[in-house]
Image (cartoon, grey):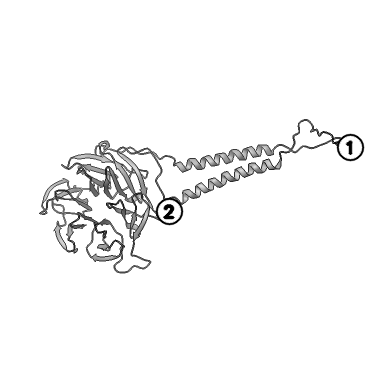
Amino acid sequence: MPELQGLTVPEGQTLERPAKDNQLVTLVILVLILLGLMLFYSFLNKPPEAVTQRETPGISHVFSIYGVDRQDLLSFPNAVHVTDNGDIYVADTGNDRIAIFNSRGRFKSEIKTRGKKLKAGDLITPLGVTVDSKGRVFTASFDSGLMVFNSNGKVVKQLPIQGTQVYTDGKLVYLTAPGSVYAFDEKLEIARHIGTRGRKLGQFETPQDLLVTEDGSLVVSDTQNMRLQIFNKKGDVVAYKGAPPLDMDAAERIFGLGTGMTQDDLGRIYVADAFHHAIRVFNEAGDDLGEIGGQGDTDGLFNYPSDITYMGGNTFAVADKWNDRVQVLRINVEDARVAGEEASEATRGIPIWAYGIGLLVLLALIALVLRRLLSRRAKPTFEGPSVPL
């Protein structure tokens, strides 16, 4: 048998790369593409959150609630209430419901009575929400009036009184209504009635919100009159901040449009100022401590905020109405700017998930380029005399 002779390759030619090496490169590329698709799928199914950006002075963003999921988003949320256990109740006005989330912003349940066909007694366009110590949920609406639900979300009572916000101090349930403030007792019978419609002290033009201080004083956000009014237990005006302007563009206006408000443990009052897209802060004596925030759609900025509620410490929940979200924020009053000054626009950053997808795509491209370079090496051709065996 003839001896096997050595095989030589003509100068300038190379052997073809083994098929198993090409298969390995292809497998690596497919794995990288698969990981990228999995990461992208995970992002699509993640509850929507605002991207990160440079913090707004005086505000640290904790998280935002945009809805139940990406297919079920909030629509013009007008009010927000936080219970003692941290649950967040949102008057989801555009969706005719009260949406309930836990302290981390995860959806728990909803109170919704309206189906495809409207029927008497349905909850329609709720504007305000609060919860008492028994777990009863109170809602205010111009369309449905004052409605009361038990802890299981069943309607227990409905009063045909138009209102914008509800509040409870543990003894009475208060309702702000056009030109009036009502207080209801345990049996939901009217215990107090304050105010008439007008611009004088003691009168209201569609008050938006209220709170009761430790000494029993009633502070009302008299929205259309651009002021806060403080009433004693007898219902007399004892102090006020702001005044109805001669016109909406008057320079002497203290508020753009004060809407919802809340009070912290130090007695400071925080007012959501819709037209200034900011949070106004006053101390217990009524001194102006400035405003925080500005207009925008990134974290810590607002677009016509309509309500704010205190969560303890320096943490607050804000109904950022025209951004269709609720923001949970930490507010540092010491960083408040003088009211009326322009806010510094926060810059939009790149979300973390984008870096991961970008890295996987880059690796896949590098692997693809390497494969193309290797595949360009031509197969050897053997010309001339045959190789003897």
> Residue 349, can we see it?
yes
Looking at marks 2 and 1 on the same chain, the residue that comes earlier in the sequence is marked by 1
Image quadrant containing the C terminus: top right
Q: Nearest to the eye among marks 2 and 1: give it.
A: 1
User: In the rendered image of this protein, does residue 300 appear above or below residue 166?
Assistant: above
* Residue in view at x 24 percent, y 65 percent: 158
Image quadrant containing the N terminus: top right
Q: Quadrant of residue 337?
A: top left
Residue at the disc numbered 1: 2
Number of the label disc, if any, that sits on residue 70: 2
Q: Nearer the viewer, residue 201 or 185?
A: 185
Q: Position of residue 254 (x, y in %)?
A: 21, 43
Q: Position of residue 381 (x, y in %)?
A: 79, 37
Number of the label disc, if any, that sits on residue 264: none
Asked if the residue under mark 1 is in contact with the one under mark 2, i.e. CB atoms within 8 Å, the reply is: no
Q: Position of residue 253 (x, y in %)?
A: 21, 44
* Residue in view at x 32 percent, y 51 percent: 321
Which residue reaches farthest right?
1
Which residue reaches farthest front?
1
* Residue in view at x 48 percent, y 49 percent: 42
Answer few, some or many: residues within 10 Å of disc 2's Cα (few below 14, many 20 plus, some between 14 and 19): few
Q: Is residue 78 left or right of residue 247?
A: right
Q: Amino acid at mark 1?
A: Pro
Q: Position of residue 171 (x, y in %)?
A: 18, 57
> Residue 138, can we see it?
no
Q: Nearer the viewer, residue 355 or 253?
A: 355
Q: Amino acid at mark 2?
A: Arg
Answer few, some or many: residues within 10 Å of disc 1's Cα (few below 14, many 20 plus, some between 14 and 19): few
